Amino acid sequence: MNGQRTLLLLPLLLLLLLVVTNAQADRGDCCTDASCSNVVGQSQCYRQNVEMTVCQDPQFPLPYFRKYLNGVDETGGTMCVYIPTNELLGECCMTSDCNPNGGMCYPLETVSSCRAMVAQGMNLPYFRDFYNGNACHELARYGSCCYTADCNDETCRGSLLPEMCQPKGYAYFRNHNSGGCESVRSGGEADPHIQKFNGRWFDYQGECDLVMAHVPQFTPHQALDLHIRTKIRYDYSYIHAAALRIGNDTLEVASWGNYAVNGVDTPRLEGSKRMGSTSDTFPIYHRQPQENHTIVDIVLSQDSNITMGSFKDMVFVRFTGATRFHFGSTLGLMGNFRGDMMARDGTTDLSNDITVFGQEWQVRPDIDVPGNEEEKTLFRALDGPQYPEESCRLPPPQRLKGTSASSSKGVSKKQAQEACAHWTDPQRQQGCISDVLVTGDIDIARAMG
C-alpha cells in the first residue's frame, strides 16, 4: 500500500521539482539594449545574476534581460528578452553626440531624473536613449503620449518621444518643455487619405477645391487657411495642388515640384522668406530629397511645422506637432482639434456620412467665414468644379482599393504589402497598399511618408 502511495506521489514530486528549477532558471543580467552584449558604448548590463523583476525597478528600469539558460550563470548560454516599461532609461549628457567618454554623461538615469538635474542647474541637456539604439536627443523633445486632445493626466504616459506615440496608438503629445498639447501628426496625401488631428484616417474621393483647414485664431492677429484641389484619374482621385495662407501671404504647391509664394514661381526658400503679416511670421525652407520629390517646410516652432510637397504629380500636406495654441479653433476637412467631423456651424456632427461631410467643405465663395471677408479659392487659377456652378464630382463606384491579389497596373498585392511594410499604423499601411495598387507605382510607398 505504501509503495502504491509512493508511485502516486512521484509524478507530483517531479512536477514540483520542475517548477522550482524553472523558477531558479529566470536569472540573468539587466541590460540596456537588445544585443545584451555588455560592451561599453553599446549595450551595458548593470545588474548581474538577478531575477527579471529586479530589472523592472520603477526608479531605474532596464529594458532587456540577459537570461541564463542553465539558471545559474552564463556558461550554459544566454537569451536576450525585452521587458516592457513606461519610463525610458539612459544617460544624461553634456554634448549633442551623447559621447559617454571623458565623463560627459551621467549614467543610468531616467528622462525624469535628467530633467530634475537640469532644473537644479546642471548642464545635461541631452539624453542618450538606451531604448532606441542609444539615440541622442534633446530633453526638450521628451514628453507624454496621450489619447485625448486635452492631454489629461489620466490618458497620458511618459516620458517618450513624439514619434513614438502614434505607433503605440496615441494621437497627442504633451510637450514637457512647453507644457503644450500637440497633435502628433495629421494632414492629407495621395489617393486622398485625410488624417485628422486625433490620428484617425478617412478617404474622401470628390473632385473639387476643398477647405482642408480654416483656423480663424491661428495667432492672436491672423488666420490660417489651407485648401486642396483634388482630381479624378481613372478609378481613383488624388490631391493635385494645395494652397496655404497665413495672414496675407500665400504658398501654393502643385504637381511635379512646382510652387509659388505670393504669385512668384519657384523663389529661393532658405529661411529668409517668411509667411505672416504681423510680428508672428514663420520661415519657409525648400528641399528636394530625390528626383520628382519636392518638399516645402513652414517652421512654426522648434517642434512644430507644416510640410507641403509633391511626389511626381501627387501633392501632400502634413502637420507635425500641431499645438492646441495654434490649431484649437480649426474647422474643415481635417475636423476640429479633437478630430470631430463638424459642419461649418461647428456643432453639427457629420461623421456618419463622409460624402456629405466632404461636400460641406467644398470651397464656397458665396459665404462669409470668421477671419475672412469671404471664402474664395486660394489658388491663382480656377480649375475643376467650382461652387455654386458645380458640386464636387465623385469617381465611379468601382474602386480597386486593394481588394484583389493583383493589380491591372502591373503591381501585385504582395508587392504592395512588402513596399508598405515599414508603416506601423495599420490604417496608414492599408492606405499605402491602396495607393501602390491604384497607381501601379511602388516608389510612392516611401515618398508619401
Image: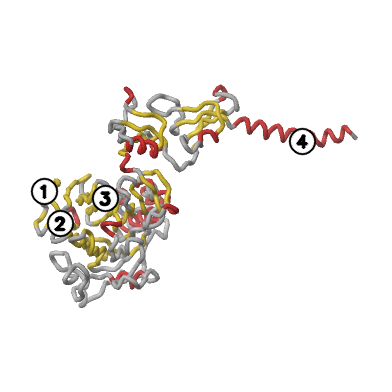
**Whole-Å distance between the Cαs marked 3 and 2?**
16 Å
**Label 2 crowd bin: few (<14), some (14–19), many (20+), radius 10 Å:** many
Q: Compare marks 2 and 4 and give the one earlier in the sequence.
A: 4
In front: label 1 or label 3: 3
- Note whether 163 is above or below 255 in the view shown: above
Q: CA distance from mark 3 to mark 4?
A: 64 Å
Nearer-N-terminus badge (3/4): 4
Residue receiving disc 2: 276
Residue 60 picture location, percent across and down? 46, 35
* Residue at (13% x, 61% y) in the render: 248
Q: Earlier in the sequence, mark 3 or mark 2?
A: 2
At label 1, the amino acid type is Arg
Task: Identify the secondary structure beneath mark 2.
Answer: loop
Mark 1 → mark 2, Cα distance in angstroms: 17 Å
Quickly name the residue at label 1: 268
The label number, if any, that marks residue 18 in the structure image: none
The residue carrying mark 3 is 304
Q: Which residue is mark 4?
A: 11
Foreground mark, 2 or 4, reads: 2
The Cα–Cα distance between marks 2 and 4, rounded to whole angstroms, is 80 Å
Judge depth for marks 3 and 4 and give the one in front. Answer: 3
Please give left or right for residue 195 compared with residue 19 in the image.
Answer: left
Q: Earlier in the sequence, mark 1 or mark 2?
A: 1
> What amino acid type is highlighted by mark number 4?
Pro
